Image (cartoon, helix red, strand yellow):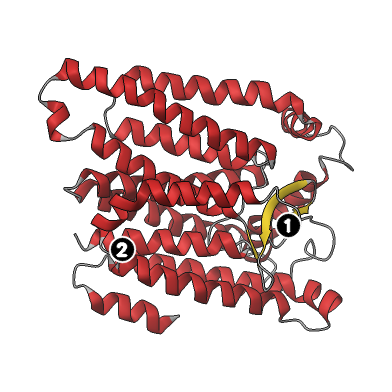
Amino acid sequence: MATIFKTCLLAGRKTDTVLLGTTSALLIFGILMIANVSASFSQEKFGTTYYFLNHQLMNIVIGLALGFLAFKINLDLLKKWAPFLLLGNLVLVSMVFLPVIGVSAGGATRWLNLGFTSLQPSEFLKLTFILYLASWLNTRTSYKNKLAKVKRDRSFGQTFLAFLIVLGIIGIFLFLQPDLSTFIIILLVATILYFVAQTPFWHIVILFLMGTGALAVLGPIASYRMKRILVFLKPETDPMGIGYQVKQALIAVGSGGIFGLGLGMSRQKFGFLPASMTDSMFAIVAEETGFVGCFILIALFLTFLWQGFRIGKNSRDNFLKFTAFGITSWILIQTLINISSMIGLFPLAGIPLPFFSYGGSAIITELIGVGILLNISKK
């Protein structure tokens, strides 16, 4: 891991070393947490304390390798191939519904069985959608369209309809899985990029209305979504059912105090807190490292935010600017939602904590995104 990061650093003098160091710190912190949280589960299921840790390390190595390729790739090719990457990703997303190759778990159909491992295409969809949207916005805000404002707005209005159709197709696929949380992230990132691109305000309004409308319509369809919202509004509702995870997460966070119980000393991870390796990882971090550890974690993510936006702001090419803002927004939106849901400020959404939560597709996609950010920083 250190060798690949060192190679990236030497590959370009202008590479953002602060972003590189911040990501390295988050990865190391995340590995430490996975190692101690997963040990008991690994021992119970596989007779060894290192099973989940080894899998996560393997995924990180794959992510670093692909991230290095993203760091070295010609960004003009990335812009050119962005629509095809999204199209290919949508094909993969649709394949999860096929027999044999599609995998269901926990009432959701989101994975592809590749034989030696599984793949969650919706995780990669976040990144390919950002690349597609950045390419699309770059085309719409090109110099030629700026020559005539009226003509530009008319062109923008016509192509915006095509974009809404693409967004609608993505929404249908994610709803059928179901994976509404990924669709929410995509909508939020799209709204931010539309604001950065200074597009007509009515486009942003439509995106906002689409998002709220989708939540209003799709929320009641699945009973568990409504229960999560009710528990969020009234925490004492169903404390041993749908509200159990929130209750146990708050106990974990509160138990940490100022300095925490110490690494490996969490009590909630021993069968009390559901999804402790994935969605609930922040609660375990809070329990074991306390306020100090949480402060360091949040400071690292805020540094990531600052550097990512700085890279976008300093980019002269609009595609690179939009891509940098999109990737940074995606990582920080996920972080904000995950942490907020663990402390009762947001309904449970099943969103992993970037660089920390166990899961191959998520960590691989995040490291590819960082590789692209570092590539943009060279420009």
Amino acid type assigned to the residue bearing label 2 in the image: Leu
Q: CA distance from mark 1 to mark 2?
A: 38 Å
Res 33 seen here = yes
Res 279 seen here = no
In the displayed structure image, the side of residue 273 where residue 257 appears, left or right: left
Q: Name the residue: 65% across, 21% down.
A: 216
Residue at the disc numbered 1: 255
Q: Residues within 10 Å of mark 2 (few under 14, many from 20)?
A: many
Residue 353 point in image, percent of width and height:
58, 55
Q: Name the residue: 58% across, 77% down.
A: 58
In this orientation, which residue lies closer to the viewer: 138 or 263?
Answer: 138
| Secondary structure under the numbered disc 1 in the rendered image | helix
In the displayed structure image, the side of residue 173 where residue 267 appears, left or right: right
CB of mark 1 within 8 Å of CB of mark 2?
Answer: no
Q: Choose the circle earlier in sequence order: 1 or 2.
A: 1
- Name the quarter where the C terminus is drawn: bottom left
Residue at the disc numbered 2: 374
